[in-house]
Image (cartoon, rainbow, N blue to C red):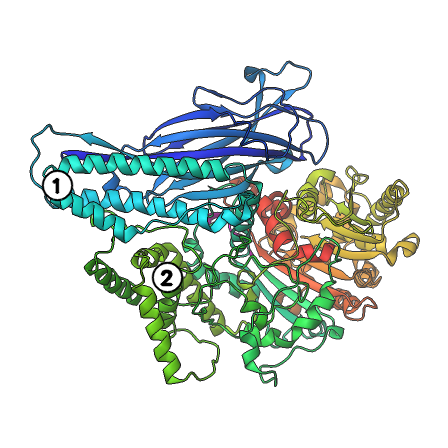
Amino acid sequence: MRIELYPVFSVYIRLDQFHNVDLSLRGFYQIRFRFKSLQQCVMGVERERPSPASSAGSSPRREAVCEASVHEGVAVSSTVEVVFNEESLRLDDVFRCTVKVPKRLDHLDTVNVQLQFELWFLDRSEPPRNEAFQFVSKRVVDLDLRPDRSFHCHRPIFFECFCLSAVTLTVHSALISVLPRRRKEQPDPPIDDKLRICHNSLCYSMLSTHYSLQSFIQRHIGVTRISCVENEPINIQKEEATLRSALESSDQPWHQLEGDAVSLSCQLTGLFNQFLELFSRSEELDSVLYRDFDQKRMKALSEGFFCSEHPIVSLIDEHFEGRVEPSKLFEAIKKSNYLEKMPNQPLHSADGDPDFNNMTFISEERFLPSSLGRLPSVDDDSPRSETYRTVPAITCTETEDLDSPEKEAISSRRSSRSAAIMRGFCLPLKCTGRDDDGIAYGDEPCDSDGFLSIGADRMMKRRSTDPGSSMRLDIECLDQRMNALSVHSSNGGGLSPPISTGNKSKSVANIPQNSDQALLLATARQSANSSVESLPQPEEAPQDKRSKRRSLKKRLSGTNGCGTQYLVSLLDRRVIEFVTQKEKFRQSLTQIGYTGFLHSDTARFSCRKPYFSGRTSSLPRPRRDVHLVVLVHGLEGAADDLIPYRNYLRMALPEARMSFLMSEWNQTYTWLDINVLAERLLVEIERHIEGMNRAPTKISMIAHSMGGVIVRAMCGLERMKPLSSLLHTLMTFNTPHCGLLYNQRAANWGIALVQFWKQSQSLEQLCLQDAIDFRDTFLFKLSMNGALGMFKYVLLVGTYQDLYVPGHSALIDSCKAAKRDKSAQGVAYAEVVNNLRESMVSSPKRTTLVRYTVQHSLAHSARAHQMIGRAVHIAAVDDDLFVEKLLTVSTLKYFV
């Protein structure tokens, strides 16, 4: 090549706000970030000072202690002083980074750039100087730069949980220019295929990015305060034909290549600068991008999260119909590789975002009281056509109280079972795309109809762009269709991706709603219909089918000149493979008789807002009752063990009036009699209530390990009766509700050794060794006090990986060893299980039991902790992603 083209990207980064969630130290804080690249890119970072006009519309900020700066390639944010709890401080620091890629444009597919964000602290007693700050925590974020599309994202970056804080940032990036570099001097040879390929690559990348930016502006201009902007997207086909014609007719084609590179670079740089002038400080656009990111992240969090429903009376029958052991589900998901194909989130953080390497699998089993209505059979007389209707969701406003999960379940029970067995869903012919309010796929207004049951009507509300849609794609067939379409477009003079070695198919991003995106979805439907069990559809007249085909062809050969590019842009092979493998996984679930569903297939999640999104309504808030949440640690635990649950409840439910009590009175006494510990816990709660400005109307308990047994013992105390009517939710993690019997032999030896060494009364009670007769033991008597039936919701979280607390004990379940044991111990254990279950089945509060069987990911756990079983036992309180997944996907509704 006589002339080589090298791309240049521009990355705009604005540090918006710094949020103190649970920082223990008060003083000065800074956010620093630096760029890293494995491709040896030349990167320069500059701070961009806001003009008075651009900063006029933004929210005012407190004056910074020190202004932002750039020092030796490291961007340093404004220095802020943290004084209060749950404080948000505006930074509003803008940095521009130029990335010069040393790889030729025609050989480039994606440039991976890493941004390392660091949190630094300085005590307020010292003068704030950059060199005096101390490093606290860091997060590494991956940013993929594509030469054919722009990138736009707004998201928070969380730092470690025990110094929990976050910085919200906005990132806009795009290819802005191409640098031509001459390798050989003139005279130049005549035009050849290499030159045509290079020119085609130049036109494809520059025009695609140009169109991507224009389309983004056109779609989102409505959310800004700008009244009118003339921004008609370019006609790519026409522009490409003009440039190609000029190249073919030029006497100096290599000089023409240089000129086109300079001309297109000037246009693209100007457009990107105009875009930043319009949107760089738009809070409305930030909100739209944040909702989009949050919904995609919630979709990823909910992968590997199963859910099934049963009547609570089925607890009496351990072999009731329709139940599949969680171990079979986990085995099926391990055999399937669909999670390996799951696309990462924009600005993906390996430590803070869900992916295949840190995915925790959860099986949720809801046991609903019979008063919520019967579970319908598949033969119900309800008309099937109703499942096709997309009923507008009911928006949860600021002034509306959330319905209880029981009321929500009643309205959606009608189609729960029928929805569970429907494995295939056909996408609509018309792509829903993105509404003007920026709601992404699945990001619909929160519905107060049916938290506990997911009906078929709710399942059909999924957006057609949902990568988790239940659809099997024949990739080979789809590729053949796309190749045919590409040939058709190229014959008509349309732009097609350059053909070069090692180059993947490129695409144009940010497709508008009324584009040929729907055409690809319709094409995918045709190839999927042969292999997917579709929902029954009404018969369609032949003339209707012919008219649809004509409409489809007309849209393909439309005047926008981008039909092929729209289709190719959606052919992200990773997404297609993910959808295909997920559908195969669903089929495997059908084969083992599973009638539940995956949370990732639901249209929306609990009524939560994205973190730090703030209130969106100016209406006065009604005065709400106070909800006291007591967090109780376990054996040899500390009050800080359950801090992650407190923090995520605060962030996910910012408008709920919650008061948190981190129990600490038993920190150094957990080896004593559990009855004594229960008395101490009750006194601690009573004193906390006395100090509250307003008495609570609800009391919920979150307990880890032995803490759950302490809570149950406390509920049986005489002095607890005045508070028993306030009990709302009990959530326990790895709690030995049925004792430590039938554990692994190594675990039994370890427990016996610790009990002998510590002379622990509590361990003796948990092992049912505190009395000669099993019916006189503490746990047997405790099983008859009806404590679980005093709560409206009982959430049991356990895992069979735990070597400290048996999974069957944490989940109040039987086990094979107990069933085989015909001794007095086996009989007593069976009675303990039955007593606990009976207390919930016959509860006057119509208790709802939810069991979460967990298989933790131990990728980041120490090997020594894994060998002794400690890693699994503490993962429920130590794994931030698990805490967030459990709360935000499923359990939040039980705390509102």
Residue stretch rendered in magenta on the structure: 356-361
In this rendering, position of residue 856 left or right of residue 337: right
Q: Which residue is mark 2?
A: 516
Which amino acid, mark 2? Asp
Position of the C terminus by quadrant: bottom right
Disc 1 is placed on an element classified as loop
Tag of residue 250: 1
The front one of 317 and 654 is 654
Q: Which of 695/859 is in front?
A: 695
- Cα separation, mark 1 vs mark 2, equals 34 Å
| Residue drawn at the location 27% of the way across and 53% of the way down | 237
The answer to whether residue 530 of the structure is visible from this angle is no
The one nearer the camera, 150 or 781, is 150
Residue 146 figure quarter? top left
Q: Residue at x 74, y 57 (%)?
A: 400
Q: Nearer the viewer, residue 826 or 869?
A: 869
Find out whether residue 357 is within the magenta segment: yes
The quadrant in which the N terminus is found is top left
688 vs 492: above or below: above
Mark 1 or mark 2: whose residue is earlier in sequence: 1
Q: Position of residue 26 (x, y in %)?
A: 69, 25
